[in-house]
């Protein structure tokens, strides 16, 4: 049997670089597509709805807009493909491992499709644009799933101990929010390029630059890590949907997912509306979005060591519940905010606390459940556990996108405040549901099966 190399923090940091890449691509699409493809420009923010004239804007079913339905269907498709890709990855036995080959193959197509979303659906025919946008978004989510699902499975496999699981969750949380934060720099970068290539061209070029940087980051992680050197993985024999059913039959995992899906519904409402909250409610120029996000990110990163220490002292569950209630405060402030840049900084500072907590610890909880299942059954289905989680929360995200675009179809300040109120209520419900998750039992059982205190 081949002797495996030890997993080091250096390796985990390099792995986390891949998270920066895909979170940057995801951030560009999730944070700016709605902003540029819907809404209307004003004196302060002339780029709002810049591409809106090329896409059907009127509600097509009750108050459901085409754009909201396209985003929702894309997310549902994304969720459905998660278990299929996870099953494929779990059952694979490629020379370079079960996860890395997918990451190497998908990095470039994933980045190119991101650029295409802001370039291709802009012909002179609205119906053609609608179809192109829908098709491209479906392909975008497919490529994202084919990269991210195997990537997420490595969180549990590289997190061979409890300390490594918390560490890798911390590192990828850091690179995730850095990627998301840089995506908010899009209007600033576009503004710097506008003189050379025009208003629309500057946005397309800015997206292309960010996608190129993201692609390089994903390739670094995919080609640096030789999976077989660190992980003795054996293909799972369980078929994808049988594995999915087995995964959801785990009671503790279900308790985690109930709250997680509600949390992501609330968070997606908030993230989708963030640019609108700042420009329409607080009346801040969209170029301030990056500054506010960077402030939130910087404070959140400073809190990472505290979260890491507290997770070991009071447990991940207790901290996650604190994170839920903290986000409730953020959503309440947003719903009640007034005009002025100071409101943006209040929200940014307040959101840093739950961002630090919920950016790190949920992945570690899933990794704990996956590890316990591996010890109890002898079968490693890490890919399916992370895919089942993403399957569930993406359904919540899909619903959030439909709700947001439907509630805000009137584009009034009251409609944007309503989305923050909905986020507050649902996040509160998620906090209450998470009390049922039994972290103490899971960790105790892992210790018992390993026959040591090392988990």
Image (cartoon, rainbow, N blue to C red):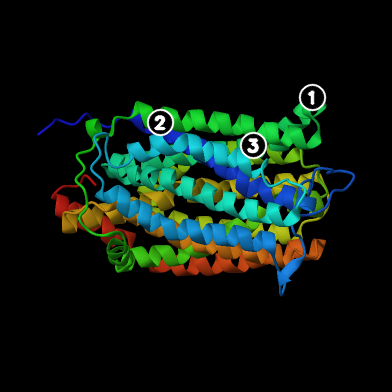
Element type at marker 1?
Answer: helix
Q: Which mark is residue 372?
A: none
Element type at marker 3?
Answer: helix
Element type at marker 2?
Answer: helix
Q: Name the residue tied to disc 1.
A: 196
**Would you call the spot at circle 3 few (<14 residues within 10 Å), some (14-19), or many (20 or more)?**
many
Query: Measured from the top left, where is residue 43 in percent x and y?
Result: 90, 44
Q: Which mark is residue 294?
A: 3
Q: Are marks 2 and 1 in contact (CB under 8 Å)?
A: no
* Left or right of residue 437, residue 233 in this image: left
Q: CA distance from mark 1 to mark 3?
A: 27 Å
Q: Residue at x 49, y 34 (%)?
A: 108
Q: Viewer-proximal residue, 344 or 388?
A: 388
Q: Name the residue tied to disc 2.
A: 221
Residue at the extreme bottom of the image, as rendered: 62
Q: Residue at x 58, y 49 (%)?
A: 136
* Left or right of residue 39, residue 132 in this image: left
**Would you call the spot at circle 2 few (<14 residues within 10 Å), some (14-19), or many (20 or more)?**
many
Q: Viewer-proximal residue, 101 or 437?
A: 101
């Amino acid at each position: 049997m081949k002797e495996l190399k030890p997993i080091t923090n250096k390796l985990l940091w390099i792995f986390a670089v891949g998270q920066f890449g895909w979170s940057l691509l995801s951030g560009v699409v999730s944070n700016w597509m709605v902003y540029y493809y819907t809404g209307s420009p004003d004196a302060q923010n002339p780029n709002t709805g810049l591409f809106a004239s090329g896409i059907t804007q009127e509600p097509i079913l009750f108050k459901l807009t085409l754009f909201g339905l396209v985003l929702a269907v894309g997310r549902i498709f994304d969720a459905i493909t998660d278990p299929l890709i996870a099953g494929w990855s779990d059952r694979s036995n490629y020379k370079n491992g079960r996860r890395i080959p997918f990451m190497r193959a998908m990095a470039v197509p994933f980045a190119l499709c991101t650029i295409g979303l802001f370039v291709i659906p802009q012909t002179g025919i609205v119906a053609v644009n609608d179809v192109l946008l829908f098709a491209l978004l479906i392909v975008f989510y497919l490529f994202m799933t084919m990269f991210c699902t195997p990537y997420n499975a490595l969180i549990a496999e590289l997190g061979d101990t409890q300390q490594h699981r918390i560490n890798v969750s911390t590192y990828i949380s850091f690179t995730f929010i850095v990627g998301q934060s840089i995506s908010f720099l899009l209007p600033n970068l576009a503004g710097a390029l506008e003189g050379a290539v025009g208003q629309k061209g500057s946005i397309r070029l800015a997206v292309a630059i960010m996608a190129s940087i993201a692609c390089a980051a994903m390739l670094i992680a995919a080609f640096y890590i030789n999976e077989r050197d660190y992980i003795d993985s054996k293909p799972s024999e369980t078929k994808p949907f049988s594995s999915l059913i087995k995964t959801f039959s785990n009671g503790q995992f279900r308790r985690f997912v109930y709250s997680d899906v509600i949390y992501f519904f609330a968070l997606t409402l908030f993230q989708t509306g963030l640019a609108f909250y700042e420009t329409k409610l607080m009346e801040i120029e969209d170029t301030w979005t990056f500054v506010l996000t960077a402030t939130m990110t910087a404070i959140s990163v400073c809190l990472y060591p505290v979260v890491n220490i507290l997770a070991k002292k009071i447990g991940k569950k207790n901290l996650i519940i604190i994170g839920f209630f903290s986000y409730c405060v953020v959503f309440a402030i947003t719903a009640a905010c007034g005009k002025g840049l100071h409101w943006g900084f209040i929200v940014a500072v307040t959101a840093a606390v739950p961002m630090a907590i919920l950016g790190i610890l949920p992945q570690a909880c899933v990794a704990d459940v996956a590890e316990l299942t591996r010890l109890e059954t002898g079968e490693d289905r890490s890919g399916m556990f992370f895919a089942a989680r993403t399957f569930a929360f993406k359904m919540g995200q899909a619903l959030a996108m439909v709700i947001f675009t439907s509630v805000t179809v009137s584009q009034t300040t009251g409609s944007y405040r309503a989305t923050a109120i909905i986020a507050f209520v649902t996040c509160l419900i998620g906090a209450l549901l998470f009390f049922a998750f039994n972290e103490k039992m899971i960790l105790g059982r892992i210790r018992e099966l390993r026959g040591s205190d090392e988990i």
